[in-house]
Amino acid sequence: MMNGKRYDVIVIGAGMGGLSCGTLLAKEGLRVLICEQSSKPGGYCVNFKRNGFTFAPAVHYLNEFGPNSQMEEAFQTLGLPPEFEFCPQDPQRRIITPHFHLTLSTDIDQFEKDLIHLFPKEKLSIHAYVEELKRLVKNIEGLSIKSLDLISLKEKFQLLYKFVMTPQLLRYRGKTGQEVLDSFFKDPLLKYLLTFGARKGSSIFTCAGPIMWAIKGNFYYIKDKAIGALPQLFLRYYKAYGGEIFFNTLVKKIAIEEGKVRGVQIEEGEEIQSRYVISNGDCHLTFQYLIGNHLLPDRFVRKLQNREISAPIFTLYLGVDLDLAQMGFDGALVHHYPTIRKNPWEEKDAEEFDIQKEKMAIRMDSIKNPMLAPIDKHTVAIAAFAPYDLFADGSNKSPHYAEIKEEIAQKIIETTERVIPALSSHIIVRDASTPLTYERRTLNKRGATMGWYLSAKELSRIRGQKTPIANLYQAGHWTFPGGGIPMVIISGINAAKLVLKSMKKLA
Ligand SMILES: Cc1cc2nc3c(=O)[nH]c(=O)nc-3n(C[C@H](O)[C@H](O)[C@H](O)COP(=O)(O)OP(=O)(O)OC[C@H]3O[C@@H](n4cnc5c(N)ncnc54)[C@H](O)[C@@H]3O)c2cc1C
């Protein structure tokens, strides 16, 4: 055995889900080990530096981090100090299309007016839609996201009551964005805008998310800190509570004996024993490779094989010597639609794909957090959905990978000049992540950004975090309640509570 020790719990992966789970378990006095294949904590929630510029490959905004929020409660549960200042990002985003500019901020009445100004024929429908979302936000306020495996009978009744008292939840449960937007609006351009980039089959709640966050003022960043400070804070407290972590340690197998976990095997083939294992890693990797289909129920394997995963992203990172603030930018996320599609739900495969027609999210994080760039310089990160198969030949890297990556980067720069004029002549640092980069760094299959693709159908099915193997639980975006930083922190807490409950340490 690596250090001759037997652990109560081994957590596979130090993403935010794994760190949150490990922190609570260590705080409760359990012997916990986290095995992380990379050299850093945080999974997708990290930073990297290039010549004095600090970039975030993924996480840009945080929901639920304001006063009296779910994360305030989570920090208390995890025994983390309120060390960071979470500032609202307001306006939340600026939408730039070839036809108009539009701002989405907490001043939702102004947003409604601006939309009506652009689409006067849809005045009544726009008002009805915004009012419906306001009611929904008000009604779901304070709804706790606990795994069904953890809630008491009383809490189940309270949840049921909340559902009954929130008719929108029942009305739109299982409904796609397409169905609901079609029922409100006629104008295809308006419908396209209100998808906010959600895919065909997505739930209406995915499309309505940005407006609901604006109504609630639920869009934050960490003041004077890069996002990678968040996992570092978790790690510091995890270790202070006595938790151990092995970096550069790939888990190759979950050891199972008579249907129950016994520990994990790491790269060198050594087994480390533990009573419980939590997987914070990719779902396919966990079940098909670390366990093996032969040890799992057929129905479970079939379900796993048939589920869709979330779409991957291409991100271009630029360090520029432009004074972006002087040019009128305020650090709000810019959603640039170079073209407007006639059919909002059209999906392109790798062959038909043209990045210059895709919606691009442009982040200029150093405007709000100047420490991310050298003086008088700025960071610009431009992200767009891009098919995995564009960069891969089957499951291997395409022989033309470098050329495709360069071509896409050039096209993104060219298109973004419509938003940031003369961008190409002010670039001093450049890097990019393809879906393969994301996959390599975090082992998320095909660079999935948020675990499973949560279609309207999937979202309406409430899932737990238990697995068919006894004492093996999941934490992170491949399980309940879903993707995004607040969700995976909650899922880590839920997984830890499942262990504590099973050990009868939870009242
Ligand atoms: C481009 C992009 C933009 C995003 N933007 C936002 C945003 O603005 N706001 C937001 O809230 N969310 C955003 N997300 C989503 C969010 O980043 C993820 O949902 C979340 O970080 C997932 O956390 P996790 O703990 O589930 O897993 P991950 O971050 O995937 O971490 C899993 C960890 O497990 C490790 N691991 C896996 N398998 C093994 C193994 N066998 N052995 C050892 N270690 C292993 C990996 O190395 C990794 O460190 C974005 C995602 C992407 C990709």
Image (spheres, helix red, strand yellow):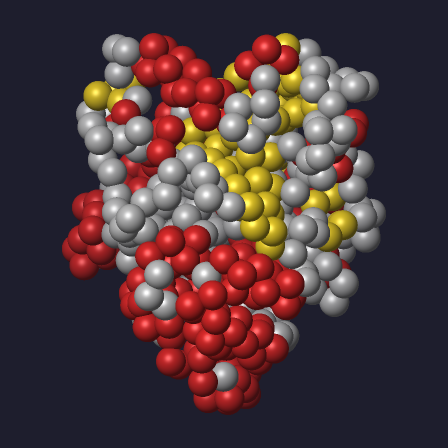
Query: The C terminus appears in which quarter of the rendering?
Result: bottom right
Residue 56 % position (x, y): 60, 31
Residue sitting at x 66%, y 17%: 320
Residue 3 % position (x, y): 58, 30
Looking at the image, how many numbered discs can be counted on the residues? 0
Res 480 → quadrant: bottom left
- As drawn, is 317 to the left or to the right of 122? right
Relative height, residue 201 to residue 379 (above, below): below
Query: Depth check: 192 or 43 in front?
Result: 192
Residue sitting at x 42%, y 35%: 338
Q: Is residue 101 visible?
A: yes
Residue 238 % position (x, y): 70, 44
Residue sitting at x 39%, y 81%: 170
Residue 312 % position (x, y): 38, 37
Residue sitting at x 43%, y 53%: 193
Q: Is residue 437 visible?
A: no
- As drawn, is 261 to the left or to the right of 240? left
Res 218 → quadrant: bottom right
Relative height, residue 62 to residue 126 (above, below): above
Query: Depth check: 84 or 8 in front?
Result: 84
Query: Depth check: 134 or 399 in front?
Result: 134
- As drawn, is 55 to the left or to the right of 239? left
